[in-house]
Image (cartoon, grey):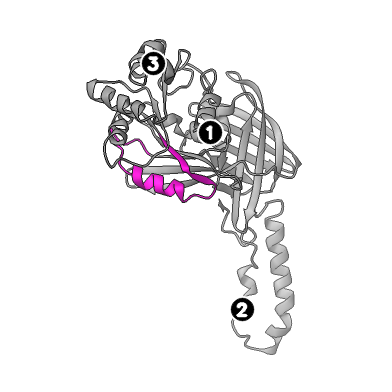
């Protein structure tokens, strides 16, 4: 989807002066072709050099700032269907900066692309011939961007779609290749991990995993049943391999639901930074006895100690509980100018999910 200016040239229509009511005399009829020709030429001269729609293509260049150094980058602008445009930014050496956007704001040769689910990251570029020049905004950091056209766009990696909710928007990240059914996961972040949801949606979708990121909503699992049904109906999803990833208190609440009768139908559970009390410890023991697949994830300097209660509840050495001492609770390395996944991520999570 894209937005252009409302000028006649941008809309690819004739100027209004070319639409007349019934002529009052034969002279008007004779002058009609000449009037239209002059009006159209005038409109073209006034808008000369302004593209009516985003120029489709593959662009390469760099993004640089003193705090970043220089990073190689690529931008693909695609036109997959009539009236619909999408763009994908790839940043080499900083994968957490890469994203796909399905809404392109384009007017007066300026393109603006905002990252879905992460409004603080925005790419703003001005077109000059085959060059794009502008900036990438990263919350409070602004980096210069320069890209030049190198050919036709590469195939789409994944698609992203906004699903408005009463308490905020959910975001669906679905791989473009739907020929082979793959795994899917509903992501239930808490307040400490919600900002990283867009990064995980991008990273896992690039691994062929469909991700539905729900808004952070307290400690409950409201809307989970609807989310699971939506994923099972999404093209390219293996309906027997749809699981849930929950953080904090939402993870404990989900374990309670899964361990009880009539709980949600999920193929696996990923829990992040969950603290166990006596009740939740019993819930995870029940899941372990059923051999229900559970992956535990912890980040922080004391991650190993935090992970010990869950590891014990799931059966000790048989449990898959990963601790990342170089990460924060969101599994990103803290104190970085550019977001960076903890060592071994996202590969470890993607491999585990695909193996379920």
Q: Which residues are magenta?
A: 215-244
Residue 223 forms part of the magenta stretch: yes
Mark 3 / mark 1, whichever is N-terminal: 3
Residue 265's label in the rendered image is: none
Q: Identify the residue at horizontal 25%, vertical 20% (top origin).
A: 277
Q: CA distance from mark 1 to mark 2?
A: 63 Å
Viewer-side residue, 16 vs 326: 326
Viewer-side residue, 302 vs 33: 302
Dot 2 crowding, Cα within 10 Å, few <14, some 14–19, many 20+: few
Label 2 sits on residue: 20
Q: Identify the residue at horizontal 63%, vertical 52% (top origin).
A: 80
Camera sees residue 191:
no
Dot 3 crowding, Cα within 10 Å, few <14, some 14–19, many 20+: few
Label 1 sits on residue: 354
Q: How many marks?
A: 3
Q: Identify the residue at horizontal 42%, vertical 15% (top origin).
A: 317
Provide residue 288's location: percent of width, then percent of height: 36, 26
Viewer-side residue, 208 vs 287: 287
């Amino acid at each position: 989807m894209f937005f252009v200016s409302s000028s006649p040239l941008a809309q690819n229509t004739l100027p209004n002066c070319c639409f007349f009511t019934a002529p009052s005399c034969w002279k008007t009829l004779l002058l009609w072709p000449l009037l239209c020709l002059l009006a159209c030429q005038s409109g073209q001269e006034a808008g000369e050099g302004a593209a009516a729609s985003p120029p489709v293509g593959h662009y390469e260049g760099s993004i640089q700032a003193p705090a970043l150094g220089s990073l190689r980058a690529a931008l693909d602008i695609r036109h997959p269907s009539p009236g619909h445009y999408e763009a994908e930014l790839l940043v080499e050496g900083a994968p957490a900066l890469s994203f796909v956007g399905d809404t392109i704001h384009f007017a007066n040769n300026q393109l603006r692309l905002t990252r879905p689910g992460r409004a603080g990251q925005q790419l703003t570029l001005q077109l000059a011939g085959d060059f794009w020049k502008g900036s990438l905004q990263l919350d409070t950091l602004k980096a210069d961007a320069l890209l030049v056209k190198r050919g036709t766009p590469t195939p789409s990696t994944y698609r992203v779609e906004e699903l408005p909710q009463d308490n905020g928007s959910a975001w669906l990240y679905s791989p473009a290749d739907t020929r082979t059914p793959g795994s899917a996961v509903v992501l239930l972040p808490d307040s400490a991990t919600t900002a990283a949801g867009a990064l995980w949606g991008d990273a896992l979708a690039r691994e062929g995993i469909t991700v539905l990121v729900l808004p952070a909503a307290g400690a409950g699992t409201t809307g989970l049943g609807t989310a699971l049904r939506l994923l099972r109906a999404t093209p390219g999803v293996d309906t027997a391999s749809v699981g849930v990833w929950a953080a904090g208190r939402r993870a404990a609440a989900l374990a309670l639901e899964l361990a009880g009768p009539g709980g949600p139908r999920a193929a696996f559970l990923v829990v992040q930074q969950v603290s166990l009390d006596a009740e939740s410890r019993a819930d995870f023991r029940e899941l372990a006895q059923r051999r229900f697949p559970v992956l535990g994830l912890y980040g922080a300097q004391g991650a190993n100690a935090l992970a010990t209660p869950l590891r014990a509840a799931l059966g000790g050495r048989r449990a898959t509980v990963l601790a990342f001492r170089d990460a924060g609770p969101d599994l990103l390395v803290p104190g970085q100018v550019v977001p960076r996944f903890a060592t071994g991520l996202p590969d470890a999570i993607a491999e585990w999910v695909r193996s379920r």
